[in-house]
Amino acid sequence: MTTRHHRRRRQSAGFTLVEALVACAVIGIVSAIAIPNLQAALRKSRHRNAYNSVKVLENAVQAYMLDKEGPPDTLNLTTLEPLVSAGMVARGQRASINSAFDQNRLISYYGWTGSWQWGYDYNFTFRPKRDPSSVTCYCWPEGLFRYDTRVGSYEQIW
């Protein structure tokens, strides 16, 4: 009797091959569903980080305009001068702002005073890190826009 009971216990220990294959299949299906969603979430997070950095930069330009009665005529695309020396952007913020952009810098900046329609205006252009080369983002006082040349239209982000 002890032998028969001992034999049953040995047969029920562990997984069968079918059970192991089913477990692998379930893991494969779940990962096939989860990985694209994770990649999309990471891409959105990267974009949101870049857009938040631009918002900080935009607030710095607006604070500069209030203080100096006009936007900076030029803006160093890497060091963000004169915003840093004027105290509108902290040195630590500069590093986090630049880290959100492709090649760690803005693509372009234009600031002007005394234009025909407004008294002053500014625009800066950037590409979030790892975005396709067809995507360019523009920040104007009217808001932040994303343009994809493949689609051919602007999308207002805020």
Image (cartoon, rainbow, N blue to C red):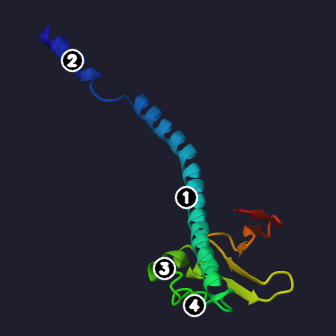
Q: Which residue is mark 3?
A: 95
Disc nearest the viewer among 1 and 4: 4
Q: Mark 2 to mark 4: distance in Å?
A: 82 Å
Q: Which residue is mark 2?
A: 7
Q: Secondary structure at mark 1?
A: helix
Q: Mark 2 to mark 3: distance in Å?
A: 67 Å
Amino acid type, label 2: Arg
The foreground one among 158 and 99 is 158
Q: Mark 4 to mark 3: distance in Å?
A: 15 Å
Left or right of residue 119: residue 85 = left
- Farthest residue toward the right? 116
Disc number for residue 42: 1
The foreground one among 73 and 40 is 73
The tag earlier along the polypeptide, 1 or 4, is 1
Q: Is residue 53 above or below residue 17?
A: below
Disc 4, disc 3: CB below 8 Å?
no
- Name which quarter of the figure residue 71 lies in: bottom right
The foreground one among 4 and 57 is 57
Q: Position of residue 77 (x, y in %)?
A: 61, 87
Mark 2 neighbour density, 10 Å: few (under 14) some (14–19) many (20 or more): few
Q: Secondary structure at mark 4?
A: loop
Disc number for residue 82: 4
- Quarter of the image containing the N terminus? top left
User: Can residue 50 be seen in this snapshot?
Assistant: yes
- Farthest residue toward the left? 2
Q: Position of residue 155 (x, y in %)?
A: 76, 63
